[in-house]
Amino acid sequence: MDPESRRLLEDTFALAKDNHRMLRAVRRHQIIGSFGKVFIWLIVLAIAAYSYFAFLQPLLGKLHIPWPSTAQSGVFNLSTTTPFGKLINYF
């Protein structure tokens, strides 16, 4: 093998090794970034769930919202006390 061909082959081999090293680094950073995103989203969802159960649920439990009775009168089971129910009964 002549010296010129050998030098070109060594340069090509060095470029291939450098390219392989860079591709492995890019892939490693991509995998670490993916795990980081999942970890951050888990933290955000955990904080949201904790906030709901620690703060919002007790406040909503104190609000005793009366539900309307299920036995309603009128057409289509609409209450006749609402203006819409009175309009339906009028016609």
Image (cartoon, rainbow, N blue to C red):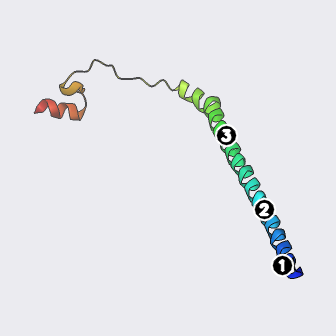
In terms of secondary structure, where does tag 2 sit? helix
- 16 lies left or right of 57: right
Query: Hey, what amino acid is under mark 3?
Result: Leu
* Nearest to viewer (mark 1 / mark 3): 1
Q: Considering the image in quadrants, where does the C terminus appear? A: top left
Q: Considering only order in the chain, which callout, 1 or 2, is on the residue closer to the N terminus?
A: 1
Query: Hey, what amino acid is under mark 1?
Result: Ser
Camera-side residue: 37 or 77?
A: 37
> Looking at the image, is 6 positioned above or below residue 86?
below
Query: Residue visible at 89% across and 80% down?
Result: 3
Query: Residue visible at 86% across and 72% down?
Result: 10
- 48 lies left or right of 10: left
Residue at the top extreme?
A: 71
Q: Considering only order in the chain, which callout, 3 or 1, is on the residue closer to the N terminus?
A: 1
Give the residue number, with chain letter if any, for mark 1.
5
Q: Residues within 10 Å of mark 1 (few under 14, many from 20)?
A: few
In terms of secondary structure, where does tag 1 sit? helix
Give the residue number, with chain letter if any, for mark 2.
20
Give the residue number, with chain letter if any, for mark 3.
42
Q: Considering the image in quadrants, where does the N terminus appear? A: bottom right
Measured Cα–Cα span from mark 2 to mark 1: 22 Å
Q: Quadrant of residue 86?
A: top left
Q: Considering only order in the chain, which callout, 2 or 3, is on the residue closer to the N terminus?
A: 2
